[in-house]
Image (spheres, rainbow, N blue to C red):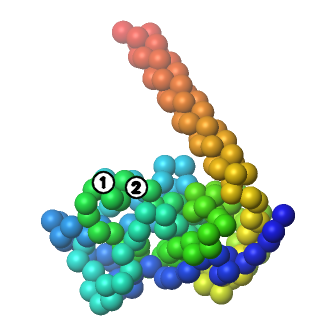
Amino acid sequence: MQLQSLSDLANIAAGHPFRGKVPESPGSGVIAVQMKDASPQQGVSWAECVETEPAGRRDDWLQVGDILVAARGSHNYAVLIDDTLTTMGKLAVAAPHFFVVRVTHHGILPEYLCWFLNQQPSQRYFDLNSEGTLTKAIKRSALEATPIAIPPLNKQQIIIKLANTIKQELQLIEQLRRNGEQLLTSIANGLLK
C-alpha cells in the first residue's frame, strides 16, 4: 500500500478570512459554509447556510470535489462538497474554521480521501497533532503532513460504495429508532387519557 502525505496529493488552503461573525446578506448569491452547517454524516446542509457578501480575496470559491476539514474542535471531521453546489447556482466559500483541501493527484478520488480523513487512523493522527487545551486546533502544517494510504482506484471505488451503503443503512436504522420512539410516546400519552 502506497503512503503519501496529504500535501503531495492536494492543495490546502484556509477558509475565507471573515473577521468575526459571518455577515448575512440575503440575496447575494454567495453562501458561507460554517461548522454548524456540516457534518460527516449529513454532508453540507445547504439550506442552513447563510448568504453573505465576502470581502477581500475572491479566489477561494468552493468547487465540487473540494473537501472541508474542520480545523478546530475535538473532532477534525472532513466533508465533501458534492454536486448540490452546482445545482443551486450559487457561489460558496468556507468559513475560516475550515481548511479547504482540493485534490491535485490523479491517483486519488476526492470521495475516498474524504472518507479516509474521517477514519480512525487519520482522527488519531489529528488527536496527536492538535494543539490547545480548551479548544483544540490542528495547524496547517500538521494537516499537510497527514499520512494517506492510496489503494488502486478500483479499490477506492469499492470502499466508497461500501461506505455509502453503510451510511444509508445507518440512516434507515436512525429513522426506525425515531419511529419507535414516536410510537412509544403515543402509547404513553394514550394511557393518560
On the rendered image, what quadrant is the N terminus found in? bottom right
Q: Which residue is drawn at 51% across and 60% down?
A: 80
Q: Which mark is residue 87?
A: 1
Question: In the shown orientation, is residue 35 left or right of residue 107?
Answer: left
Question: In the shown orientation, is residue 131 left or right of residue 174?
Answer: right
Q: Where is residue 124 in the image (x, y as percent from the top left)?
A: 76, 66
Q: Disc 1, disc 2: CB below 8 Å?
A: yes
Q: What whole-number distance in Å separates the C-alpha atoms at marks 1 and 2?
A: 7 Å
Q: Where is residue 46 in the image (x, y as percent from the top left)?
A: 35, 56
Q: Mark 2 points at which residue?
A: 83
Pick the residue in front: 189 or 76: 76
Q: Where is residue 154 in the image (x, y as percent from the top left)?
A: 70, 51
Kind of residue indicated by mark 2 = Asp
Whether 121 is drawn above or below 137: the answer is above
Kind of residue indicated by mark 1 = Thr
Q: Position of residue 191 (x, y in %)?
A: 44, 10
Q: Can residue 82 be seen in this view?
A: yes
Q: Residue at x 67, y 42 (%)?
A: 162
Q: Which residue is drawn at 74% across and 64% down?
A: 150
Whether 19 is drawn above or below 117: the answer is below
Q: In which quarter of the image is residue 17?
A: bottom left
Q: Which residue lies furthest to the bottom in this view?
A: 56
Question: In the shown orientation, is residue 147 left or right of residue 44?
Answer: right
Q: Can residue 133 be seen in this view?
A: no
